[in-house]
Image: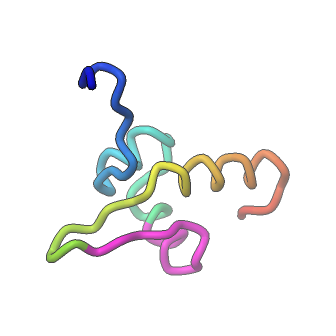
Amino acid sequence: MNDAHLQPIAVRIKEACRLTGIGRSKFYELIASGHIEVVKVGAMTLVPVDGLRKLIDGARRGRVT
């Protein structure tokens, strides 16, 4: 399989903030409120990319504040 076709299934919080344009503080608020799912792998916190898409889709429909 060619690496150029691989899409990440999860990213670190810094990259998730960059991808969505959401600031770090607001991002952590959304995690705490359950709007964003995170996965802990050892000391690393990962954000599933499909969860980011769901968050943005929900915000478009007015379901996230």
Q: Position of residue 64 (x, y in %)?
A: 72, 62
Q: Quadrant of the N terminus?
A: top left
| 27 over 40 or under it: above or below | above
Most foreground residue, 3 or 40: 3
x and y, in percent, of residue 11 in the image: 33, 50
Residue at 32% from the left image edge and 45% from the top image edge: 15
Query: x%, y% of residue 27?
Result: 46, 62
Quadrant (top left/top right/bottom left/bottom right) for the C terminus: bottom right
Furthest residue toward left: 43
Residue 3, x across and y down, in percent = 24, 25
Side of 40 where 31 appears, left or right: right
Vertical comparison of 11 with 18: above or below:
below
Q: Is residue 51 left or right of residue 18?
A: right
Q: Which residues are magenta?
A: 28-40
Nearest the viewer among 13 and 10 is 10
> Does residue 63 belong to the magenta stretch?
no
In terms of image quadrants, where is residue 62?
Answer: bottom right
Identified at 65% across, 53% down, the residue is 54
Q: Is residue 36 magenta?
A: yes
